[in-house]
Amino acid sequence: MPELPEAETITRHLRRELLNKRFARVIHCRRDVIRHGHYRELRSFLNTPITRIDRRGKRPFLEIADGRGIVFFLGMTGRLSVCDSTTAVENHTHLRLQLGDSDRELRFNDARRFGGFGFYTRRNECEPVGIDGLGPEPLDVTAPQFRDICARDRQIKALLLDQKYIAGLGNIYADESLFRAGIHPLTPASNLDAKQVSRLLRAIKRVLTEAIEYEGTTIINYLHPDGPGNFQTRLRVYGHEGENCRRCKVPIERMQVAGRSSFVCPMCQPPAA
Ligand SMILES: [Zn+2]
Protein backbone atom coordinates (compact mmCIF):
# COMPACT_ATOMS: atom_id res chain seq x y z
CA MET A 1 0.00 0.00 0.00
CA PRO A 2 1.54 3.31 -1.01
CA GLU A 3 2.58 5.50 1.92
CA LEU A 4 4.23 8.90 2.09
CA PRO A 5 7.55 8.01 0.35
CA GLU A 6 5.73 6.31 -2.52
CA ALA A 7 3.30 9.22 -2.86
CA GLU A 8 6.26 11.64 -2.82
CA THR A 9 8.06 9.65 -5.52
CA ILE A 10 4.94 9.66 -7.69
CA THR A 11 4.43 13.39 -7.07
CA ARG A 12 7.99 14.17 -8.20
CA HIS A 13 7.47 12.10 -11.33
CA LEU A 14 4.21 13.94 -12.10
CA ARG A 15 5.87 17.30 -11.46
CA ARG A 16 8.65 16.54 -13.94
CA GLU A 17 6.16 15.42 -16.55
CA LEU A 18 3.14 17.67 -16.10
CA LEU A 19 3.99 21.01 -14.50
CA ASN A 20 2.92 23.97 -16.70
CA LYS A 21 1.49 21.60 -19.28
CA ARG A 22 -2.17 21.16 -20.16
CA PHE A 23 -4.43 18.23 -20.68
CA ALA A 24 -6.09 18.26 -24.06
CA ARG A 25 -8.38 15.25 -24.06
CA VAL A 26 -10.07 12.72 -21.81
CA ILE A 27 -9.33 9.40 -23.48
CA HIS A 28 -10.97 7.28 -20.81
CA CYS A 29 -12.55 7.76 -17.39
CA ARG A 30 -14.29 5.15 -15.30
CA ARG A 31 -16.84 7.27 -13.48
CA ASP A 32 -17.33 5.12 -10.41
CA VAL A 33 -13.76 5.76 -9.24
CA ILE A 34 -14.62 9.46 -8.80
CA ARG A 35 -14.84 10.03 -5.04
CA HIS A 36 -15.78 13.73 -4.94
CA GLY A 37 -17.45 15.73 -7.67
CA HIS A 38 -18.76 14.83 -11.09
CA TYR A 39 -17.36 13.58 -14.32
CA ARG A 40 -18.26 16.81 -16.13
CA GLU A 41 -15.75 18.67 -13.92
CA LEU A 42 -12.95 16.67 -15.49
CA ARG A 43 -13.54 18.37 -18.82
CA SER A 44 -13.12 21.78 -17.21
CA PHE A 45 -9.48 20.88 -16.51
CA LEU A 46 -8.71 20.67 -20.20
CA ASN A 47 -6.64 23.34 -21.93
CA THR A 48 -5.61 25.08 -18.69
CA PRO A 49 -2.02 24.97 -17.43
CA ILE A 50 -1.26 22.79 -14.41
CA THR A 51 0.36 25.19 -11.95
CA ARG A 52 0.95 23.07 -8.88
CA ILE A 53 1.72 19.41 -8.25
CA ASP A 54 2.11 18.31 -4.68
CA ARG A 55 0.91 15.80 -2.14
CA ARG A 56 -0.74 15.81 1.25
CA GLY A 57 0.06 12.73 3.33
CA LYS A 58 -0.32 9.80 0.95
CA ARG A 59 -2.39 11.74 -1.61
CA PRO A 60 -0.87 13.34 -4.71
CA PHE A 61 -2.79 16.25 -6.22
CA LEU A 62 -2.50 18.59 -9.16
CA GLU A 63 -3.94 22.06 -9.45
CA ILE A 64 -4.73 24.50 -12.20
CA ALA A 65 -4.43 28.28 -11.94
CA ASP A 66 -7.84 29.08 -10.49
CA GLY A 67 -7.26 26.85 -7.46
CA ARG A 68 -9.20 23.86 -8.67
CA GLY A 69 -7.54 20.50 -8.46
CA ILE A 70 -7.66 16.75 -8.78
CA VAL A 71 -6.63 14.69 -5.74
CA PHE A 72 -5.74 11.03 -6.05
CA PHE A 73 -6.41 8.37 -3.41
CA LEU A 74 -4.00 5.53 -3.99
CA GLY A 75 -5.81 3.07 -1.70
CA MET A 76 -4.15 -0.33 -1.78
CA THR A 77 -3.03 -0.57 -5.38
CA GLY A 78 -3.39 2.88 -6.96
CA ARG A 79 -0.70 3.87 -9.47
CA LEU A 80 -0.16 7.07 -11.42
CA SER A 81 2.17 7.38 -14.34
CA VAL A 82 2.83 9.50 -17.37
CA CYS A 83 3.72 7.52 -20.46
CA ASP A 84 3.56 7.59 -24.25
CA SER A 85 0.06 7.16 -25.61
CA THR A 86 1.31 4.19 -27.61
CA THR A 87 2.25 2.28 -24.42
CA ALA A 88 0.00 -0.77 -24.00
CA VAL A 89 -2.88 -0.01 -21.67
CA GLU A 90 -2.91 -2.27 -18.63
CA ASN A 91 -6.05 -3.76 -17.14
CA HIS A 92 -7.64 -1.63 -14.42
CA THR A 93 -6.60 1.68 -15.99
CA HIS A 94 -9.46 3.94 -14.91
CA LEU A 95 -8.30 7.33 -16.15
CA ARG A 96 -6.34 8.45 -19.21
CA LEU A 97 -5.75 12.16 -19.83
CA GLN A 98 -3.81 13.13 -22.90
CA LEU A 99 -1.51 16.14 -22.87
CA GLY A 100 -1.72 18.83 -25.52
CA ASP A 101 1.15 19.19 -28.04
CA SER A 102 2.53 15.84 -27.00
CA ASP A 103 1.94 12.14 -27.34
CA ARG A 104 2.19 11.64 -23.56
CA GLU A 105 -0.66 10.90 -21.20
CA LEU A 106 -1.45 10.56 -17.50
CA ARG A 107 -2.81 7.19 -16.40
CA PHE A 108 -4.41 6.14 -13.15
CA ASN A 109 -4.51 2.42 -12.54
CA ASP A 110 -6.01 0.67 -9.52
CA ALA A 111 -6.60 -3.08 -9.59
CA ARG A 112 -8.39 -3.36 -6.25
CA ARG A 113 -10.28 -0.07 -6.54
CA PHE A 114 -9.97 1.05 -2.95
CA GLY A 115 -8.51 4.23 -4.44
CA GLY A 116 -9.93 6.80 -6.79
CA PHE A 117 -9.80 10.53 -7.38
CA GLY A 118 -11.83 13.62 -6.72
CA PHE A 119 -12.11 17.27 -7.70
CA TYR A 120 -11.80 20.18 -5.36
CA THR A 121 -11.85 23.94 -5.24
CA ARG A 122 -9.37 25.74 -3.02
CA ARG A 123 -11.00 28.70 -1.27
CA ASN A 124 -8.88 31.10 0.73
CA GLU A 125 -6.29 29.11 2.66
CA CYS A 126 -8.67 26.33 3.66
CA GLU A 127 -7.64 22.87 2.68
CA PRO A 128 -10.15 21.55 0.19
CA VAL A 129 -12.15 18.34 0.35
CA GLY A 130 -9.91 15.34 -0.23
CA ILE A 131 -6.83 16.84 1.35
CA ASP A 132 -8.45 18.22 4.49
CA GLY A 133 -8.95 16.47 7.83
CA LEU A 134 -5.36 15.26 7.89
CA GLY A 135 -2.81 15.69 10.65
CA PRO A 136 0.53 17.44 10.07
CA GLU A 137 3.11 16.15 7.64
CA PRO A 138 5.57 13.92 9.54
CA LEU A 139 8.59 15.56 7.88
CA ASP A 140 7.41 19.00 9.01
CA VAL A 141 5.91 18.20 12.41
CA THR A 142 7.68 19.97 15.28
CA ALA A 143 8.77 18.33 18.53
CA PRO A 144 6.07 20.10 20.60
CA GLN A 145 3.38 19.16 18.06
CA PHE A 146 4.51 15.55 18.14
CA ARG A 147 4.51 15.53 21.94
CA ASP A 148 0.88 16.66 21.86
CA ILE A 149 0.00 13.92 19.37
CA CYS A 150 1.62 11.33 21.64
CA ALA A 151 -0.18 12.57 24.75
CA ARG A 152 -3.12 10.33 23.85
CA ASP A 153 -4.05 7.18 25.68
CA ARG A 154 -3.89 5.01 22.60
CA GLN A 155 -1.52 2.31 21.33
CA ILE A 156 1.34 4.10 19.65
CA LYS A 157 1.15 2.17 16.39
CA ALA A 158 -2.61 2.71 16.03
CA LEU A 159 -2.00 6.40 16.64
CA LEU A 160 0.74 6.61 13.99
CA LEU A 161 -1.56 4.96 11.45
CA ASP A 162 -4.42 7.37 12.13
CA GLN A 163 -4.16 9.97 9.38
CA LYS A 164 -6.04 12.62 11.31
CA TYR A 165 -3.17 12.84 13.84
CA ILE A 166 -0.23 12.51 11.46
CA ALA A 167 -0.57 12.12 7.69
CA GLY A 168 1.43 9.73 5.57
CA LEU A 169 2.55 6.80 7.71
CA GLY A 170 1.21 3.35 6.94
CA ASN A 171 2.09 -0.13 8.10
CA ILE A 172 5.61 -0.38 6.68
CA TYR A 173 7.05 2.93 7.86
CA ALA A 174 5.27 2.82 11.23
CA ASP A 175 6.88 -0.59 11.94
CA GLU A 176 10.30 0.52 10.76
CA SER A 177 10.16 3.75 12.79
CA LEU A 178 9.05 1.96 15.97
CA PHE A 179 11.84 -0.58 15.56
CA ARG A 180 14.48 2.10 15.10
CA ALA A 181 13.17 3.95 18.14
CA GLY A 182 13.09 0.71 20.20
CA ILE A 183 9.38 1.07 21.01
CA HIS A 184 6.86 -1.77 21.13
CA PRO A 185 3.81 -1.03 18.91
CA LEU A 186 1.30 -1.80 21.69
CA THR A 187 2.78 0.72 24.12
CA PRO A 188 0.16 3.31 25.12
CA ALA A 189 1.40 6.55 23.58
CA SER A 190 0.84 8.49 26.77
CA ASN A 191 3.24 6.10 28.58
CA LEU A 192 6.17 7.13 26.40
CA ASP A 193 8.64 9.36 28.16
CA ALA A 194 10.06 12.53 26.60
CA LYS A 195 13.19 10.74 25.39
CA GLN A 196 11.20 7.99 23.67
CA VAL A 197 8.93 10.54 21.99
CA SER A 198 11.85 12.49 20.58
CA ARG A 199 13.62 9.26 19.55
CA LEU A 200 10.46 8.18 17.73
CA LEU A 201 10.11 11.47 15.90
CA ARG A 202 13.74 11.32 14.81
CA ALA A 203 13.25 7.72 13.64
CA ILE A 204 10.14 8.63 11.62
CA LYS A 205 11.90 11.51 9.88
CA ARG A 206 14.99 9.44 9.16
CA VAL A 207 13.05 6.44 7.82
CA LEU A 208 10.85 8.58 5.57
CA THR A 209 13.74 10.67 4.29
CA GLU A 210 15.75 7.58 3.49
CA ALA A 211 12.75 5.87 1.85
CA ILE A 212 12.20 8.94 -0.37
CA GLU A 213 15.87 8.78 -1.41
CA TYR A 214 15.33 5.12 -2.34
CA GLU A 215 12.12 6.06 -4.19
CA GLY A 216 9.86 4.00 -1.97
CA THR A 217 9.40 0.35 -1.17
CA THR A 218 8.36 -2.13 -3.82
CA ILE A 219 6.73 -5.11 -2.18
CA ILE A 220 3.58 -6.10 -3.99
CA ASN A 221 1.48 -3.20 -5.06
CA TYR A 222 3.70 -0.25 -5.62
CA LEU A 223 5.90 0.41 -8.58
CA HIS A 224 7.78 3.67 -8.97
CA PRO A 225 6.63 5.07 -12.32
CA ASP A 226 10.17 4.74 -13.73
CA GLY A 227 10.83 1.30 -12.21
CA PRO A 228 10.74 -0.29 -8.77
CA GLY A 229 11.55 1.63 -5.59
CA ASN A 230 14.41 0.18 -3.61
CA PHE A 231 13.76 0.77 0.06
CA GLN A 232 12.77 -2.88 0.60
CA THR A 233 16.50 -3.67 0.85
CA ARG A 234 16.64 -1.32 3.86
CA LEU A 235 13.69 -2.76 5.79
CA ARG A 236 14.83 -4.11 9.15
CA VAL A 237 11.64 -5.69 10.52
CA TYR A 238 8.77 -5.31 8.05
CA GLY A 239 8.30 -8.62 6.23
CA HIS A 240 11.23 -10.21 8.09
CA GLU A 241 9.26 -12.51 10.41
CA GLY A 242 11.40 -15.41 11.69
CA GLU A 243 14.66 -13.84 10.53
CA ASN A 244 17.22 -12.73 13.07
CA CYS A 245 17.18 -9.08 14.06
CA ARG A 246 20.24 -7.38 12.59
CA ARG A 247 20.91 -5.63 15.84
CA CYS A 248 20.44 -8.35 18.51
CA LYS A 249 20.07 -11.62 16.50
CA VAL A 250 16.75 -12.54 18.16
CA PRO A 251 14.08 -13.69 15.63
CA ILE A 252 11.62 -11.04 14.52
CA GLU A 253 7.99 -11.75 15.38
CA ARG A 254 4.77 -10.97 13.61
CA MET A 255 1.71 -9.88 15.57
CA GLN A 256 -1.62 -8.16 15.01
CA VAL A 257 -1.85 -4.52 16.03
CA ALA A 258 -4.83 -2.33 15.13
CA GLY A 259 -5.99 -5.08 12.79
CA ARG A 260 -2.75 -5.05 10.82
CA SER A 261 0.26 -7.35 10.69
CA SER A 262 3.09 -5.85 12.67
CA PHE A 263 6.71 -6.88 12.75
CA VAL A 264 8.55 -6.52 16.02
CA CYS A 265 11.91 -7.46 17.54
CA PRO A 266 10.96 -8.69 21.00
CA MET A 267 14.40 -7.79 22.35
CA CYS A 268 14.94 -4.34 20.79
CA GLN A 269 11.27 -3.38 21.32
CA PRO A 270 10.36 -4.72 24.77
CA PRO A 271 6.64 -4.70 25.59
CA ALA A 272 5.56 -1.99 27.98
CA ALA A 273 5.41 -3.23 31.57
ZN1 LIG B 1 16.61 -6.84 17.96
Image (cartoon, grey):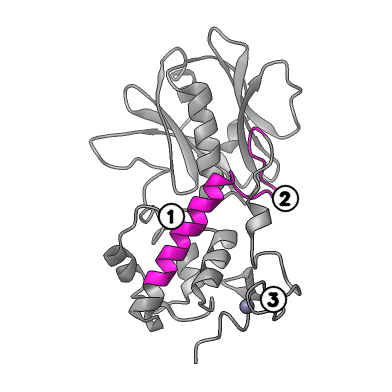
Chain-order first, disc 3 or disc 1: 1
Residue holding disc 1: 167
Name the kind of residue labelled 3 in the image: Ile
The residues tagged by marks 1 and 2 sit, at their Cα atoms, a distance apart of 22 Å
In what element is the residue under mark 2?
loop
Residue holding disc 3: 252
Name the kind of residue labelled 1 in the image: Ala
Instruction: Locate residue 49, reporting x and y percent.
Output: 41, 17
Q: Is 261 in the magenta?
A: no
Q: Residues within 10 Å of mark 1 (few under 14, many from 20)?
A: many
In what element is the residue under mark 1?
loop
Using the rendered view, name the quadrant where residue 256 is placed.
Answer: bottom right
Query: Depth-wise, is mark 3 or mark 2 nearer the camera?
Result: 3
Name the kind of residue labelled 2 in the image: Ile
Query: Depth-wise, is mark 3 or mark 1 nearer the camera?
Result: 3
Relative vertical location of residue 136 with respect to residue 215 in this rendering, above or below = below
Q: Nearer the viewer, residue 1 or 127?
A: 1
The segment highlighted magenta reads: 198-226
Relative vertical location of residue 45 with respect to residue 201 in this rendering, above or below = above
Relative vertical location of residue 169 with respect to residue 10 in this rendering, above or below = below
Instruction: Locate residue 151, reporting x and y percent.
Output: 33, 75
Mark 3 near ligand 1 (CB under 8 Å)? yes
Mark 1 near ligand 1 (CB under 8 Å)? no
In what element is the residue under mark 3?
loop
Q: Nearer the viewer, residue 179 or 110?
A: 179
- Which residue sits furthest left? 124
Mark 2 near ligand 1 (CB under 8 Å)? no
Marks 1 & 2, CB-CB < 8 Å contact = no
- Give left or right: position of 135 versus 223: left
Q: Residues within 10 Å of mark 2 (few under 14, many from 20)?
A: few
Which label was assigned to residue 153?
none
The residues tagged by marks 3 and 1 sit, at their Cα atoms, a distance apart of 27 Å
